[in-house]
Amino acid sequence: MEDECLSIAVKQSAMWEINNPRVNSLVRGFYKLVKESDSFSDEQKEEFYFILISLIKVYGNKEWSKR
């Protein structure tokens, strides 16, 4: 489910640099690697997920990039 939410966040961006299939695959792939890893605790996996969502929203915001 989380990977679907990441995909939705990517697709919500109006910026083509974020809203494209390569970024979508890259973000979902990063999350899958972390989620399936035994090296991370559940809390770290959750934090990583929210970091990815935040980065997508920040870098996908045209107004933020103008600053």
Image (cartoon, rainbow, N blue to C red):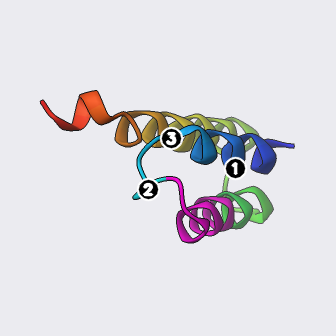
Q: Amino acid at mark 2?
A: Trp
> Circle 2: is it few (<14), some (14-19), or many (20+) Cα within 10 Å?
few
Mark 1 and mark 3: Cα distance apart in space: 10 Å
Q: Earlier in the sequence, mark 2 or mark 1?
A: 1
Q: Is residue 33 left or right of residue 50?
A: right
Q: Nearer the viewer, mark 1 or mark 3?
A: 3
Residue designated by label 2: 16
Image quarter where the C terminus lies is top left
Residue designated by label 1: 7
**Dominant secondary-structure state across the stretch colored magenta:** helix
Picture coordinates of residue 21, whole percent (x, y): 61, 67
Element on which disc 1 rests: helix
Image quarter where the N terminus lies is top right
Residue designated by label 3: 13
Near-viewer residue (16 or 38)? 16
Q: Is residue 14 magenta?
A: no
**Span of residues in magenta:** 19-30
Q: Amino acid at mark 1?
A: Ser
Query: Going 15% across and 34% down the picture, which residue do you hit?
Result: 66
> Circle 1: is it few (<14), some (14-19), or many (20+) Cα within 10 Å?
many
Mark 3 and mark 2: Cα distance apart in space: 8 Å
Q: Amino acid at mark 3?
A: Ser
Q: Is residue 48 left or right of residue 1?
A: left
Query: Going 68% across and 37% down the picture, which residue do you hit?
Result: 46
Q: Is residue 66 left or right of residue 27?
A: left
Q: Residue furthest right?
A: 1
Picture coordinates of residue 64, whole percent (x, y): 25, 30
Query: Going 41% across and 41% down the picture, which residue do you hit?
Result: 60
Answer yes or no: do the residues labelled 3 and 2 have beta carbons within 8 Å? no
